[in-house]
Image: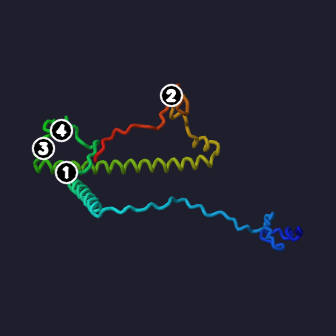
Amino acid sequence: MNLPILFSRFAVGVIRQGPIALSTRNISMNSANFIYPSQCLYAEPLRARKKLDPGQLKLREEKRKRKLEREIRRLAKHAQSLKPIEEMQLPLHIQDQVNQRTRAVLDISPDEEERRALLLKQWSYHRQREHYTDTKMLNRIAYSQSIALDELRHESEELYQAAIKVDESLLPISVRGPTLTPPIKDYDSPDGDYQNTSFKWD
């Protein structure tokens, strides 16, 4: 046997040496052995579909239609009834006292209605004049103050800065205590779970 011929190219194949066929295998990492992985198929084999009786299929379809018709009738029956709001419902013990709590409507004469309307107009006019007078007085005070501060600034800058300084003694208030609420000792904080007691309307 000629060894240089067997391992000359390091290839997989069959070398015939006379009447004897010698098989060789590649020991190189770069040759193609034509071995590769297949794709990952994440699926189960298809199940054989069972042949159903046409009568069974018809019964199922009719049952589904009857169920839908019942739901439609139920929705149509309660279409006009709205979900009540408990916060806006009048309690029963108040409903029993409706007659006692109802005030009688007073009959007002046309002269009384006219007198009330005239009184309302006079009151509105009075409040309007009062607001106008207060606004005019405040504007006059602010204008006089600005003129006085300008004249004071021309005389002395120190006196001007002292005049515009905020007088903290006008509001004698003092607050003592922590800026944040201190923690409660041995307080078992809830974990966020709660029990819903709301009434469910179907």
Q: Which label belongs to residue 117?
A: 1
Horizontal placement of 113 versus 129: left or right? Answer: left
Q: Amino acid at mark 4?
A: Gln
Secondary element type, mark 2:
loop
Q: Quadrant of the N terminus?
A: bottom right
Judge the density around disc 1: few (<14), some (14-19), many (≥20) Cα neighbours within 10 Å.
Answer: few
Q: Which label belongs to residue 19?
A: none
Between the residue at mark 1 and the residue at mark 4, the CA separation in whole angstroms equals 35 Å
Q: Amino acid at mark 2?
A: Tyr
Q: Is residue 163 placed above or below 5 in the rendered structure?
A: above
Comes first in the chain, label 3 or label 4:
4
Secondary element type, mark 1:
helix
Q: Are marks 3 and 2 in contact (CB under 8 Å)?
A: no
Q: Which residue is mark 2?
A: 187
Q: Are marks 1 and 4 in contact (CB under 8 Å)?
A: no
Q: Are marks 2 and 1 in contact (CB under 8 Å)?
A: no
Q: Which residue is mark 4?
A: 95
Between the residue at mark 4 and the residue at mark 2, the CA separation in whole angstroms equals 44 Å
Comes first in the chain, label 1 or label 4:
4
Secondary element type, mark 4:
helix
Q: How many marks?
A: 4
Judging depth in this view, the residue of 44 and 9 nearest the camera is 9
